[in-house]
Amino acid sequence: MPLPVIGRGANVTSCLCGGALSRRSFLRGVLLLGGTIVGGLLRGLGPAWAFSVISEAQEEEIGKRAHPQILEKFGYYKDASLQAYVSQVGQRVLRQAESSPFTFQFTIVDHPMINAFAVPGGYVYITRGMMAELNNEAELASILGHEIAHVTSHHSAEQLTRAIGAQVLTLGLAVLSPGGRENTPGWLALSNELFTQILLGYGREAELESDEKGLRWAVKAGYDPQGMVSFMRTLEVRYRLSGIGYHALRATHPHTLERMDRARVMIGILTPQPGRALEVNADDYKARLEGMAYGEPGEGKRIRILAAQEGENVKGVARKLWGTENRAWDLALLNGIRDEDRPLRSGEKLKVIYDPFDESPLRPELDIHLRLPKDPSRTTP
């Protein structure tokens, strides 16, 4: 069951005022209480009792104004084919989501950090670093579903209300009307808080609620829910090794293993549509990453996609690539493979990071593994 988030927007107005006052009248009344006092009260409310004084129209305006700033900060990943693919998967999951007044758009941003995030109004983003970390379409669907849930559940608007309540009431709402200026203290406070949310998330209950909704919608869209569990497992290992993690894992108090257990319980409850097989689409997903930039800009690293030969395992592929099995574990982690000795399917796709400055880069003779013709419509950043 979703964790309750009580009283969003106009529902709170009706609750407090018996439905007799409009939202504008309610806000005027709140302002009379004193912005500083109200701000302190809002910041003191826990997530389960969160509410927003930001209307859906104002949420849409926040997203509209934040979108170009996000692209300026993180960059737009210049691959039309991959952008269209992510949008297609996102729209497929969105069709199973709860009703929302927002028109959603899905964008890959050109940044190496492992992250996906959303801002109010239906703007969902995934970094190329996250795309490189995922290993199948089902994982992508669960991530996009999680971020869609943040938007439809108004988590960002509620967090803005709690974090900068006084400024939202006294300054922020004025700049969110058409023609409002963006270089005001109110908008600067809002945009700064948005970027904090991008990095840290929305807190325990909001992340758990989005886990549940995103998983449910992905399954209704026809995707295998194990994708979320496998993704969490991989990122937990990555986080322990390097401290690098996705906001949805960092921002919530329950340990990742507990969240995986909750997801498994949900998987046991959810059932696919009768007669419909659940999709994973691992090889197709990896094929689309061919040539993607990897790591920091300027390093020159790219993702190459290899096709395994009959009877090979990850250790054998590592020996071919680098002359040693020492990097087999890294190769397995990158591809979400738990057993390095597992025989690979003939033609099974593997991601390999090509580093032009590596002492043992991908050797030309191994190009016989490459089964994927280069798509001329793809452009590199």
Image (tube, grey):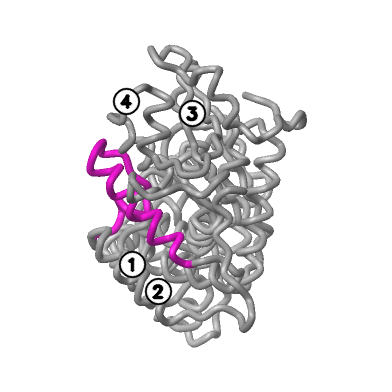
Q: Which residue is mark 3?
A: 294
Q: Does 233 lie within the magenta span? A: yes
Q: Earlier in the sequence, mark 4 or mark 1?
A: 1
SS of the residue under disc 1: helix
Q: Residue furthest right?
A: 377
SS of the residue under disc 3: loop
Q: Does 113 lie within the magenta span? A: no
Q: Which residue is mark 2?
A: 5
Q: Nearer the viewer, residue 309 or 264?
A: 309
Q: Residue at x 37, y 28 (%)?
A: 319
Q: Which residue is mark 1?
A: 205
Q: Residue at x 58, y 74 (%)?
A: 220
Q: How many angstroms separate mark 3 from mark 4 (CA)?
A: 23 Å
User: In front: mark 4 or mark 1?
Assistant: 4
SS of the residue under disc 2: loop
Neighbour class for label 3 at 10 Å: few (<14), some, many (≥20)?
many
Please report contact status of discs 2 and 1: CB closer than 8 Å, yes or no: yes
Q: Residue at x 44, y 76 (%)?
A: 7
Q: How many angstroms separate mark 3 from mark 2 (CA)?
A: 38 Å
Q: Earlier in the sequence, mark 2 or mark 4?
A: 2
Question: Where residue 324 is drawn, which disc sits there?
Answer: 4
